[in-house]
Amino acid sequence: MKKLFHALAPGFIMLLVFILASCGGGSTGGSSSGGNNSGGTGGGQPLNITFLPKAINNPYFDSAASGGKSAAGELKGTFKQVGPSSASASEQVTWITNLTQQHVSAIVVSANDPNALAPALKQAMSQGVKVVSYDSDVAPDARQVFVNQANAEDIGRTEVQILGKQINYTGQIAILSAASTATNQNTWIKYMQDELSKPQYKGMSLVKTVYGNDDDQTSFNDTLSLLQAYPNLKGIISPTTVGIAAAARAIESVNKGGKVALTGLGTPNQMRKYVKDGTVQQFALWDPGKLGYLAYYAAAALVQGKITGKEGDSFDAGTLGKKTIGANGAILLGPPTIFSKDNIDQFNF
């Protein structure tokens, strides 16, 4: 009998394993907080996707997060947003390390510093985490794709063109940026400077660029400092949603609304008051909700293996239609909208 048991045992164990597997006993799948609990993709990989913006509690990134949540609902995936309370590259690195240890399927990040984040993101990718940058890019070898809100050159040149018309192409101007290391800000400023070198702007001079670090109070104080240091200042460009709103408030606080022109990138809901009272004539922005929506779809396509990040790869982006990856792994959302009194009430974000 003992010999018979030893002879039958291996076959019996194999049969038991087969039965358990057939009943789903081998499943180890789970879900994360902040989204649809099914976590399904139809492709066998869970969509456990986390957004890491420059800073949380920022209206711009909150709007982008809403778009990401909508995409998660459509794809039956999960959505979570984490990040520093103020723009900090070192804190973003800590979050990236934590998310890698949690084995999320994708990190969608807007970089405070393109190079400082690179080692941690490369480590995440080496462990199978997909990396998508959005809004502000990281070093290209530290992500698979970059979801670009609009053509960087168009943004930079448009800001100068808007301001030039308002001040009759004459006078001192300044730039109020976000962090000095922010990839998108520095790229736009480079094109602003190039646009200013054209003959039609010979009467305009860029006297200073300051950095409010996407902090409301810092940006407010920087604007007041500019107005004090340059009493003949004619205009300010602030290509950051936190900065432009703080600058508008600062200009009004010293009764210079309509005397110092202000343009930049802002959300309609933030800027509506200042447009209607004449402090700001025009500003521009894309829809951040659509940016977050597209970034989630891109991350999902990477997780599902539908794209790899190479130029020419294409994927379905829900209501935004088919999107194709361009040079350097970039996916373009589309051109920005210019807001004024004539159209601002048509938008709610």
Image (cartoon, rainbow, N blue to C red):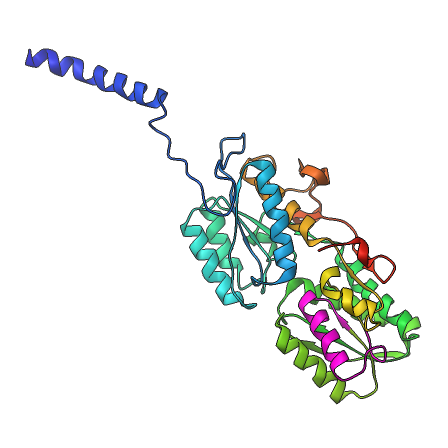
Relative horizontal placement of residue 31, taking residue 217 as reference (left or right): left
Residue 334, above or below 15: below
How far across and how far down the image is residue 295, in percent? 63, 47
198 shown above or below 32: below
The quadrant of the image that shows the C terminus is bottom right
338 sits to left or right of 328? right
Q: Residue at x 85, y 80 (%)?
A: 259
Q: Position of residue 186 (x, y in %)?
A: 69, 67
Asked if residue 53 is positioned above or below residue 236 in the image, the reply reads above
Q: Is residue 336 magenta?
A: no
Q: Which residues are magenta?
A: 237-261
Q: Quadrant of residue 59?
A: bottom right
In the rendering, at what x and y percent does residue 159 appear?
81, 66
Task: Name which residue lies at 67% across and 78% down.
Answer: 220
Provide residue 221's location: percent of width, then percent of height: 66, 81
Q: Is residue 188 left or right of residue 102?
A: right
**For this rendering, which residue is in front, 254 or 5?**
254
Where's the N terminus, which quadrant? top left
Q: Is residue 309 visible?
A: no
Residue 264, quarter of the rendered image = bottom right
